[in-house]
Amino acid sequence: MNSHQLRAQTLAKKPPVPLPGEPEEVCAEATETLTKLVNVMNNETTLLRAGRLLEASELAAPKAELAQKYVGLARAIQHNAKTLKETAPHLLMALQKHQSALATQMAENMRVLATAKSLSEEIVGDVAAQLGQAQKPKTYGINGSTGPKAQSLQGVSINKTS
C-alpha cells in the first residue's frame, strides 16, 4: 500500500469535516484567503530583499493567521472534495490555480528568507571574529617595542543549529 492509499484510508476513518457554508462561499473564502496570503508573502519578500527586516517581521502574525485560516478551509474542502467535484468543479479548478500561485510565492519567500538568514549569520560571524581578535597596539614605546597586548573581548557566540 502506498502513502496516498494509506492517507486516503486515514481520512476515510476520520469523521467528515462539514463545509462551513455553501460550496461557493467556502471556495470563494478560501480563494480570498489564498490571495491575501500570497500578497502578504510577496510584501514580506519585497521587504526582506530591501533589507527592511523589522518591517518584514511585523508580517509574521498576519501571515500565520491567514495560513491557519486557509488550512482549516482546505481541510473542509478536502473532506468534501467528492461532493464539490460533482457540484462545483469550476470552483475547485479556480482554487487550484490560486494554490499554484501560493506554492510559487512560498518557494520565492523561502529562498529570500534563507538568503537573509545566511547573510545575517555571516555578518554576526564576521563581527564575532573581529571582536575575538586581540587588539594590537598601534604605537611603539621608547625602546621601539610595542606596548602590552590588549586582552581579547569575550562573550560573543553564534548558535547555527536553527
Image (cartoon, helix red, strand yellow):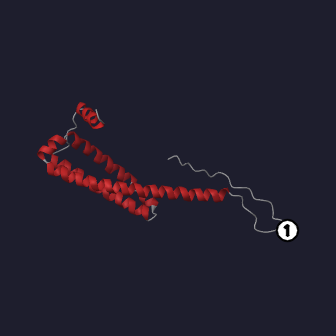
**Which residue is at the front of the view, 68 or 78?**
78
**Label 1 environment density (alpha carbons within 10 Å; few <14, some 14–19, many ≥20):** few
Residue at 32% over, 49% down = 67
* Residue 62 percent location from the top left of the image: 35, 53
Residue 33 visible in rendering: no
- Residue under the image location 39 percent in, 59 percent down: 44
Q: How many marks?
A: 1
Residue reaching furthest to the right: 143
Q: In which quarter of the image is residue 47?
A: bottom left
Quadrant position of residue 139: bottom right
- Name the residue: 30% across, 36% down: 3
Q: From the top left corner, tell me how far across and down residue 138 is, in percent.
A: 75, 68
Give the residue type that dot 1 points to.
Answer: Gly
Q: Could you tell me residue 63's position as x and y percent?
A: 35, 53
Q: What element carries label 1?
A: loop
Residue 113 visible, this orientation? yes
Q: Looking at the figure, which quarter contains the N terminus?
A: top left
**Front position in the image: 22 or 123:** 123
Would residue 57 be found to the left or right of residue 7 on screen? right
Q: Quadrant of residue 137?
A: bottom right
* Tag 1 residue: 144
Farthest residue toward the left? 87
Direction front: furthest residue: 1
Residue in view at x 28 percent, y 43 percent = 72
* Residue 12 falls left or right of residue 46: left
